[in-house]
Image (cartoon, grey):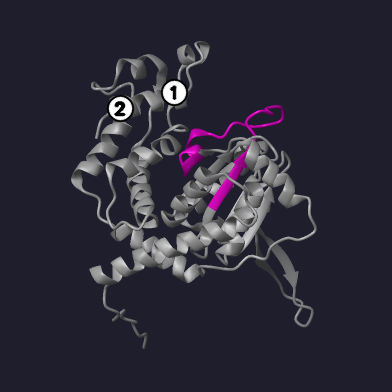
Amino acid sequence: MATTTVDTSAPPTPDADLQAVRELHEARRLLLAEIEKRIVGQKDVVDSLLVALFARGHCLFVGVPGLAKTLLISTVADVLDLSFNRIQFTPDLMPSDITGTDVLEEDHTTGRRAFRFVAGPIFANLLLADEINRTPPKTQAALLQAMQEYRVTAGGETYPLELPFLVFATQNPIEQEGTYPLPEAQLDRFMFYVTVSYPTAQEEREIVRSTTIATRPPLRRILSPHKIRELQDLVLRVPAADHVIKYAVDLVRSTRPGEPDAPDFVKENVSWGAGPRASQYLVLGAKSRAILDGRMAASVEDVRALAKNVLVHRVIANFRAESEGVTSAEIVGRLLEKVKG
């Protein structure tokens, strides 16, 4: 007779949640201290990464080579005690190189043959998709189910991914030969589009100083996968007032040129605006940002702070905008000035 396991644990109390927020705020300070042992500057990039991490969001990091995008992601995996795999995306990469494949094995004692699934590198807590736009859309699509449903289907069988599961991808914006633009469906799976900029002169001097010596500081692990899952659940319990949700939805709907209330500059320069997933990510990101800052409520300012990272890759500029040099980032910036909370 089958038995049913009943979860008898009490739901978290408000006091327990407040204590968890305080613990996460302290953990953030410790995380930043560890990350700064290897990464100089890039404060906004690191903040965006942590917000996405606790909001269960995937990130696309875009910047020229040599800005430590790969090092940052591997460092975060080390500090958070997460299993980590890196895939170098190339034109000849196949979907099975990501998800895994069935191999035929023979039992030498019985002579029987059977297929066994060999898991691919996607089976990790943190997956670095390095130069994701260097592989064709068919191979890029191998990530779609995993990023949305946290499972992989291969050979007619479905395999769950161990949580937390996050895809952090990198992309080089200047070298376009031999690259394949990410389809909109793939882009929409990424919570944030994070631009990684050049360091300041002072930061660059410190980078050169710290990377041209023999010693490399050891990293201390701060959070376990189990604790990260608990904090991700905490984000879902953070309250967002009706006016915060309304602002997020109003901002997203204003990106759509077909909306009656869309600004004229949107109707003139945008082919397609952001979908409902953008509204969800704005609110989830606002909640995550709030608790990382030690607050137990999301605000309009949290939404505004994350808007560019959430919207810039979801606002598709039309031919007129491209011919006049109007970028999606500029359109989102104008929307933030026009749509008030």
Q: Looking at the image, is 314 positioned above or below residue 21? A: above
Please state which amino acid type lies under the numbered disc 2.
Ser
Residue 33 visible in the shown view = yes
In-front residue for pair 298/131: 298
Q: Residue furthest left?
A: 242
- Tell me the element at label 2: loop
Residue 40 location, x and y as percent?
62, 48
User: Mark 1 highlights which residue?
Assistant: 330
In-front residue for pair 303/126: 303
Dot label at residue 121: none
Residue at 66%, 34% in the rendered image: 64
Q: In which quarter of the image is residue 234?
A: bottom left
In-front residue for pair 185/109: 185
Residue at 61%, 42% in the rendered image: 170
Q: In which quarter of the image is residue 268?
A: top left
Residue bounds of the magenta highlight: 167-193
Q: Looking at the image, is 327 positioned above or below residue 200? A: above
Query: Do the residues bearing badges 2 and 1 touch, measured as CB atoms within 8 Å?
Result: no
- Tell me the element at label 1: helix
User: Mark 2 highlights which residue?
Assistant: 254
| Residue 153 magenta-highlighted | no
Q: How crowded is mark 2: few (under 14 residues within 10 Å), some or many (20 or more)?
A: many
Instruction: Tell me if 338 is positioned left or right of 56 in this view.
Output: left
Q: Which of marks 2 and 1 is nearer the N terminus?
A: 2
Q: Residue furthest bottom?
A: 1
Label 2 vs label 1: CA separation? 14 Å
Residue 200 location, x and y as percent?
61, 36
Q: In which quarter of the image is residue 179?
A: top right
